[in-house]
Image (tube, rainbow, N blue to C red):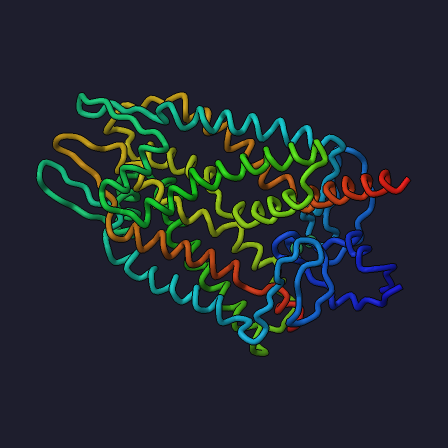
Amino acid sequence: MKLENEDALDNLIICHQCYTLHEEIPIKDGSKACCSVCGGILYRYDNRLIDHGLALSITGLIFFILANVFPLVQIDILGSEQYITIPKTIFSLFESGFYVVGMICAFLIFIFPLMIFAINLILFTLLKFERGDLWTKDLLILLSHITPWSMTDIFLISILVALVKLIGYAQIHMGISFWALAVFVLIDLYIVKRLHLSEVWMLRKRIIQNRERNDRG
Amino acid sequence: MIEVDEDKLIRCPVCAAVNIDRGKANSCRRCGSGIYQHRRFSTEKSWAYLITAMIAYIPANLYPMLVSTQFGATEGSTILGGVVLLWEHGSYPIALIIFVASIMIPVVKFLILIYLLISVKYPIGKDKKVNKHKLYYLTEIIGPWSMIDVFVVAILAALIHLANIEIVAGTAATAFALSVFFTLLAAHAFDETLIKENK
Ligand SMILES: [Zn+2]
Ligand SMILES: [Zn+2]
């Protein structure tokens, strides 16, 4: 295979699922390119990626706060009322001496999800104003290291499993935070699983190239 | 113009950029991360994490995951014991979810990683019937779901704090969480480009 220079490697893409090499071709706004071997999604093209990214990270952060300040679920058991919030779940592990599990849970369901959305917010703001090229690079690297460790979706399913175990023993009321968490998980799935970081890298490259071209001419 | 061998192209595990494989001196042209620079100990790091995870999985199954105290009587239930109990009570879907998340997924992940780590070093399993990249991708996708039982225990322990009835996490919760953590590390440390070399 002949290439003009090493930079032309950016026109190539290796499938995340099956490692097949593909050439990147321009696609229509809002559409996606799939792997011809395994059908996995290679990349999408979104003309307004920055605006969508900004809107999603702000909405996500709002719902994350809502999911943390109100009760997730409330139960009536043997005449007494009990409720949990996300912080309370983590603290109760620490209180009963489970520091390791407490730390792991704190990172998986609180610190990492919060970091991902805060980083996305800063990242897309910097991209929007075309500033801080070195910052955006470091943020993108950090983001790809922590995204596999965000598990709010699994925590949401765990709440349901725990509640099913309690059916028959207690009366269950879903709290506001449960629904906020459900919305947060949907946004999280979109921003973490659907938005490929390589698309943001390409967007960053286009912004830098445009600026250099403008500077020269 | 440069001439590039298509088989020499690798994907950066951090930013997914396509790079030319330069052996030991690999560092990504886009993000600068080292791409599997530990060529001499290519699988050892992953093995170390995996063995730690498998060792932690033993106490995770032997000790109680959940300890409940009802009117002074303490009772602990292990992962498997909990699944059997749920099944006997007729909660089949929940019993299945816990069984898949806590027993099937960890064991399948161990087996896949062992197979991958052995097959990139020794000439077994060179058949092209199984796509090893897809197997690896599978472990990435299913891995985190084994945390379900730990979260469930944490939720129940936080929720049930009554005068006469109390639920606390058991020793197995720590062992299990560590096991999941190290399995994820083992999967991340696995060098996907080794699969390509051994095709
Ligand atoms: Zn593919
Ligand atoms: Zn890279």
Relative to B107, is A196 above or below? above
What residue do we see at 28% from left, 24% from top?
Answer: A75
Q: Quadrant of the N terminus of chain B?
A: bottom right
Position of residue B61 measured from the top left corner of the image (x, y, whole percent): 29, 57
Q: Quadrant of the C terminus of chain B?
A: bottom right
Who is closer to the viewer here, B134 or A147? Answer: A147
Who is closer to the viewer here, A155 or A70? Answer: A70
What residue do we see at 84% from left, 59% from top?
Answer: A5
Who is closer to the viewer here, A208 or A149? Answer: A208
What residue do we see at 59% from left, 73% from top?
Answer: B39
Relative to B96, is B107 above or below? below
Q: Is B91 on the left-hand or right-hand side of A58?
A: left
Who is closer to the viewer here, B16 or A207? Answer: A207
Position of residue A92 measured from the top left corner of the image (x, y, whole percent): 27, 37
As drawn, the residue found furthest toward the left would be B72
What residue do we see at 52% from left, 58% from top?
Answer: B188
Relative to B2, is B138 above or below? above
Residue A72, quarter of picture: top left
In the rendered picture of this protein, how many numbered marks are placed on residues? Answer: 0
As drawn, the residue found furthest toward the bottom would be B123
Q: Is B158 on the left-hand or right-hand side of B30?
A: left
Q: Is A76 on the left-hand or right-hand side of A30?
A: left
Position of residue A186 measured from the top left corner of the image (x, y, whole percent): 54, 32
User: Visible in this render: residue B199?
Assistant: no
Position of residue B148 measured from the top left corner of the image (x, y, whole percent): 39, 44
User: Visible in this render: residue B27?
Assistant: yes
